Image (tube, helix red, strand yellow):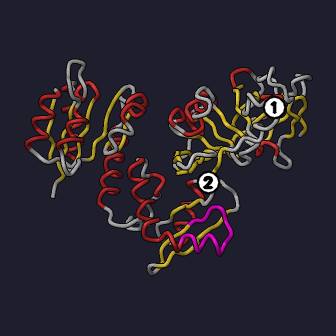
Amino acid sequence: MKRSILIADDDEVLCEWLGEIFKRERYNVFKAYTREDVIKLLKEKRFDVVTLDTETMYPYDAEMNVLEFIKDNIEPKPCVVVLSVNSDEYAEKFGDKYEFVYRYISKPCLPEELLKSIDNALIADQISGPFDLPSDTLVGELDFKKAYDRLYNMLFEKYGSQIDERFDETGARTIVIYKDNDKIRVAGISHSPYYPSADELRKIQAKVGKICYVVGRDIVEETSGWTYIPQIASNPYPTIPLYIGKADEKCKEIINDDKLLEADFDTGNPDILAFDDEYLIKILGQEVMSKVIQCRQFKRVYDPKIYRYYCYVNKVKIGLCDSKVKTKFCCADFDILFVLNWKNSPFVMASPDRIAFVGRALWAPEKLRFSLILNAKEPNNMFSQVEC
């Protein structure tokens, strides 16, 4: 049975072009060029997929946008993809309000990207269990928050007790699991808080021949170790300047103004090295991105709510300069968290302007060693010496 798609865009040429692409993919195609046409068709027919251009979705003179109409009037909800030249802005504005939107995609986009996004969304909606996916599918590549959440929610609802048992048996912080005859088996473990890369997970999955999930047990608690130091009690997150470069770069290549950023330092979160992914991509380039999106959990002290955020891990080189002897510097390689949608992540709740949040992992053996100057009057000059 053919699926039906409603393509809504005020650009009629683009509508026709997308329509031809989806016809080749065996969709029944309907097109609309105005908000009124979209709502009229939604009232008359049931669609599997709706693509919305933001100008069509919410013209300036409209009292109600199309997403609001779908939210209040359409059941079951179609797979909705929003196309916009400012996709991040709309994702931030509407992401939490309209959970049925699978993705906000930047225009212009490749037709392959749009088709893959829609295929992934439809797969996620149709599955009845977390392991009802082709064995060569990486869960992290289903790059929709709703799909990712739905799969993991089903996983823990049905197999939560078994997952806890596997953690207790292995003593690991991160495990790779798969299902074998309705039993949860462990395909890999790690005592690190970081998850395997896409390539590592793909190798594990190919070896067991089954769909795998990466599960982390750690909940990061925001507990500043500086809070009780009188001289900087007003500044629990002292700022330190870091240089960021690609892992294959030499130290001297990254010590320049273009690769300098300010990071908030917190001794209470030893394993956290979290950075705004958009900011780092500007510095490092698009090629550093990874496809594995990981769900992490974050809990603030005295706050019972657990916050979820999304990230991926990449190896980078971090450098420090001596604050007194500028010619003295050193670098080390670190696996860091590239946090998606940083402005809505829990890392900015205490300090909205921060772009990086790092803990004592910078002090790890054989990494970077530095001595902090405990002086709140010098927030941007918080270390006095660097030792490699």
Asked if residue 143 is positioned above or below residue 7 in the image, the reply reads below
Q: Which element carries disc 2, helix, strand or loop? A: loop
Q: Position of residue 156 (x, y in %)?
A: 47, 65
The amino acid type, in three-letter code, at marker 2 is Ile
Task: Let me know if residue 317 appears in the view.
Answer: yes
The label number, if any, that marks residue 119 in the structure image = none
Amino acid type at image mark 1:
Leu
Residue at left offset 20%, top offset 33%:
8
Specify the farthest residue to the left: 44
Task: Identify which residue is drawn at 87% across, 29% down.
Answer: 373
Q: Is residue 254 visible?
A: no
Say which residue label 1 marks: 320
Q: Nearer the viewer, residue 75 or 313?
A: 75
Residue 371 found in image quarter: top right
Residue drawn at point x = 90 percent, y = 31 percent: 385
Picture quadrant where residue 175 is located: bottom right
Q: Which residue is farthest bottom?
A: 181
The correct choice, above or below, for 245 with respect to 162 in the image is above
Q: Which residues are magenta?
A: 163-176
Q: Is residue 12 left or right of residue 168?
A: left
Is residue 237 inside the magenta stretch? no
Query: Which residue position holds label 2?
Result: 219
Left or right: residue 182 compared with residue 297:
left
Residue 97 in picture, x, y percent from top left: 34, 38
Which sits in the foreground, 68 or 364? 68
Residue at image position (77%, 23%) is 380
Q: CA distance from mark 2 to mark 1?
A: 29 Å
Q: In the rendered image, which quarter is residue 237 located in? A: top right
Quadrant of image for the N terminus: bottom left
Secondary element at image label 1: strand
